[in-house]
Amino acid sequence: MLGRGGLITVLIFSLALAGCEVASFYAKEKLERGNKTAHVLLMTPDVQLGEVTAGGLVEPNAEWTAIAEKHVVAALKEQLAKRKSRLVLYRSPKADTPKARIHTQLIKLHNAVGSSILLHKFASPPLPTKEDKFDWTLGPQARIVGHEYGADYALFVYLRDTYTSPGRVAVMVLAAVLGVGVPGGAQIGFASLVDLKTGDVLWFSRLARASGDLRTPSAAAESVKTLLKDFPL
Amino acid sequence: MARLASLFILALLIAACVQYSLVKAEKVAIGDVYTVDAQIAWNKKTEGKTEIWTVDGPLLQELRFIKGIEDGDALFRGGAGKKLPPFKSKMTAIEIKELFETSLAQIGVARLKTLNLRPESFGKVAGFRFEFTYALKNGLEKQGFALGAVIDEKLHMIIYSGTRLHYYPKHKDDVERLVRSIRMI
Amino acid sequence: MRRHRLSAVLVAVWLGAGACATAPGDGDASLADEGGTAPGLIAPGAGPGVPLVPDLSPGQRPALATDEAGWWMVMDRTESKLKTAGNLVRDEALNRYVKGIVCRLAGPYCPDIRVYLLRVPYFNASMAPNGVMVVWTGLLLRTRNEAQLAAVLGHELGHYLRRHTLHRWRDAKSTTNALIFFQIGAALGGVPVAGQIASLIAMGSITAFSRDQERESDRMGLRLMAEIGYDPRESAKLWQNLIREDEADEDKKTRFIFFSTHPAPEERSETLKRLAEDALKASPAVETGDERFRNIVLPHRQEYLRDELRLRRFSRSEELLKMLLEDGVDAGELHFFRGELYRLRGKKADGDKEGDTDDKDKALAAYAKALDAGGAPPEIHRSMGLIYLKSGQSEKAWAAFAKYLELSPDADDLEIIKSMMQPMG
């Protein structure tokens, strides 16, 4: 509950060293699909917003999170519409059926695949057999989800956003005067696009920066647009 | 992706220390005891007396060669400062399977089941084999098999495992061919 | 530059190591209420003698814009992961049973509490602010009747009813706010890491409830159990049994998590005893619920004992088995696991101890008692066979293996057992 602020600090710090706020990998730069409208299934987005207290803890904020979720979905819809694609919303299965279990396993597998991509693609050094390849997949059973929703692709979105509290701002100002750097809020995000016919991860993007906001429609739209830079649809 | 952020940080740290090397699809010596035909290209890292090979990353699938651990050694490396129970050179296959179950339980896997423990040759040596399934605490289901033999009082094992969905089946046949290609040096 | 990067790494390592022990919010399915307690973080509570009243009303939800709602949101998410956790116990009867006790204890708050059983072989339970209660199976192995189980469940409900997480969070916030100036000072002095670590220690401490909160929960739990007729004296008995197990531990490193974060066990046991006497004066509650507990929980004991032995904490498991034998229920099963314990430990006799025997002989003696009492699983014969085999008694070994295969013809290790019965060509 407490680590986030510190983690984000380190993350931002390490990325600042790398000098990039958004980076992505993809199997194909642009996906071929003729004139057909692509149906993109948005898996339940994992969004959480909070405030950095003066002492540097992150206090989760339910109200901001609820607002941000709405803005993010709206912004994704708009971005996809520009790419002749339609957003379909995923609903977690309620009952504990065999089919629901496959859904759950696929989502958990995506978690492990995403972690592997972060480990072996973003964090150097890469696996020697994958140096010039991006071929992670969830396997053909992803078709089960695609079939149920009549969707071509699945989009996974993860966003964490923290904001500097007035108390923290005061601390930052004082520290700066004294010549010490104290971090404030930060925005990090991951997104991935999965082909629901093959299970292949087509694109994976990572966003990390000390700016950005998800609490207003226009700022949220900017954040989503930045996260979707190099989106292959 | 709930824990991706913290994982990413840890990944940065871990990855900074772990450098994988390439194993080509050719005949490879495992320690100085036997060779195998690798079948496909793998990425390899070494942890003490164990080699860990993977194609897509160890979170997804791994092929583990335990290269002759001795009386008193643990089967796996435990978490932070944790010492897992030791192998004893007089153990039978039943007790080695029991040690495997105990080690995994202490590492913290759930719903572990081992199946069909049977005699099977390890190269030309009399050994044993069993299959297994388990789930991680987060619920991701894994599957695998283990082949082992005690040679000169040292335990040699080859353990292949991966996610039940896709990554275990993906290279299962390659690994079956690999274990059939064991030749004692 | 170099030093900065190093400090970042240190911080991350620290946080990474702490992540698994953090109770609310990090998504860890273990959800233990564990960790240390820092001095000076005292929750607002009532002193002894002051009646404890719930801090929230039935069905109460925090307003969306509050800090409390933030933690509810985080825990709601953790809960949704809990539903598909690998070690979630799905047995319906057992879940219904534990939930039923919680419901009776919680009264009008019953609909606000969800109970999740996790297959973890340690004694622990935890309570999240949104009403998620987690109970580990190592606890079910150690409570000896329904009243003792109710004592722990009532204690956890106390944390919920008194909103301990929220109070703890607010304390932590003000502590770290004060500490930030120390951090800046330390950074000015050229030791940025020291400042960071000081605040991290403060942060680590808020992942557990404070000792005063634990005392409050003890009182609350005791009252709840006595009110619905459970014998409140069982609460102190439970703690005494845990102390006994702890004291038997040769390797003192494995003390109960509960003990490290809660008031000193001896003090607690004494207080509970005294409170129980008071409660008994008010209402003569004497129910222990032995029968129901035996019918529903004990059928799972073999699984939990297997988990227990896998921890290889032989001295404390030995004491636990001894205590369970004092109840005398399913003695055959318990003697079998005593045998397993000695077989796995495999220690030679202690020459300084008069009459001490090798573990293999202790094992065989325990197996004999188990067979006598009945109710041991068929593996008992396999275990005996393994011991005979090692001591060179092949014929006895084969007879034992044959018995094992006769009793469990579909055994999973049939092939290897057969191969061991016709050895050396």
Image (cartoon, grey):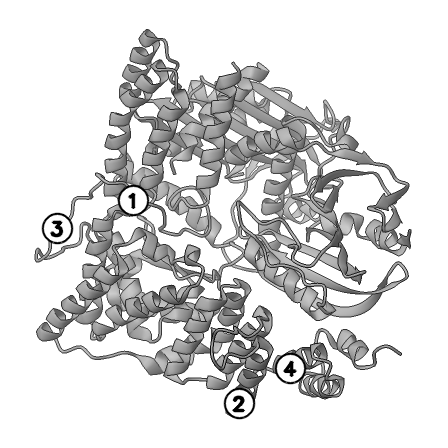
Question: Which is nearer the N-term, disc 3 or disc 2?
Answer: 3
Q: Mark 4, residues whose alpha carbon is within 10 Å: few (<14), some, or many (≥20)?
A: many
Residue plotted at (16% across, 44% down): C44
How far apart are labels 3 and 1 at the CA level?
Answer: 19 Å
Q: Is residue C11 above or below residue A102?
A: above
**Amino acid on which the number 3 mark rests in the picture:** Ala
**Snapshot quadrant of residue B132:** bottom right
Q: Is residue B167 left or right of residue C262?
A: right
Residue receiving disc 1: C37
Residue receiving disc 2: C374
| Helix, strand or loop for disc 2 | loop
Q: The disc numbered 2 marks a residue on which chain?
A: C
Q: Which mark is residue C46?
A: 3
Visible residue check, residue A92: yes
| Helix, strand or loop for disc 3 | loop
Percent of width and height locating residue C344: 59, 70
